[in-house]
Amino acid sequence: MLILAPLNLPATMPVHASQMFAKNLVNFLTLFAGKDGIRIHTDDEILAATCVTAV
């Protein structure tokens, strides 16, 4: 039996949390971007609800 016990496990978590947040943010923002620029999708209720202001 082999037991692995990293010495400073909490210090490794912020890196992964930051990477996950960045990837989620990029994926979310690409939903607004298209070939013709940024478009507000009012037909999608989730994307429309996340918009604070619309031009």
Image (cartoon, grey):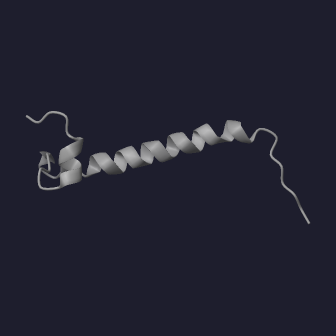
Residue 37 horizontal side relative to residue 20, left or right: left
- In depth, the one of 19 and 48 nearer the eye is 48
In the foreground, 49 or 29: 49
Residue 40 at x, y percent in the picture: 14, 46
Residue name at image x 12 percent, y 55 percent? 43
Q: Residue at x 92, y 66 (%)?
A: 1
What residue lies at 23% left-to-right and 51% top-to-bottom?
A: 46
The residue positioned farthest toward the bottom in the image shown: 1
**Residue 42 screen position, x and y as percent:** 12, 50
Q: Position of residue 39 (x, y in %)?
A: 13, 46
Position of residue 42 in the picture relative to residue 50 (left or right): left
8 is higher (above) or lower (below) than 27: above
Q: Nearer the viewer, residue 7 or 52?
A: 52
Left/right placement of residue 27 relative to residue 42 reads right
One can see residue 15 in this view = yes
Residue 44, picture quadrant: bottom left
Residue furthest left as drawn: 55
Can residue 32 be seen here? no
Kindly identify the residue that appears in the image at 21 percent across and 45 percent down: 49
Q: Could you tell me residue 28's position as x and y percent?
A: 31, 49
Asked if residue 11 is positioned above or below residue 43 in the image, the reply reads above
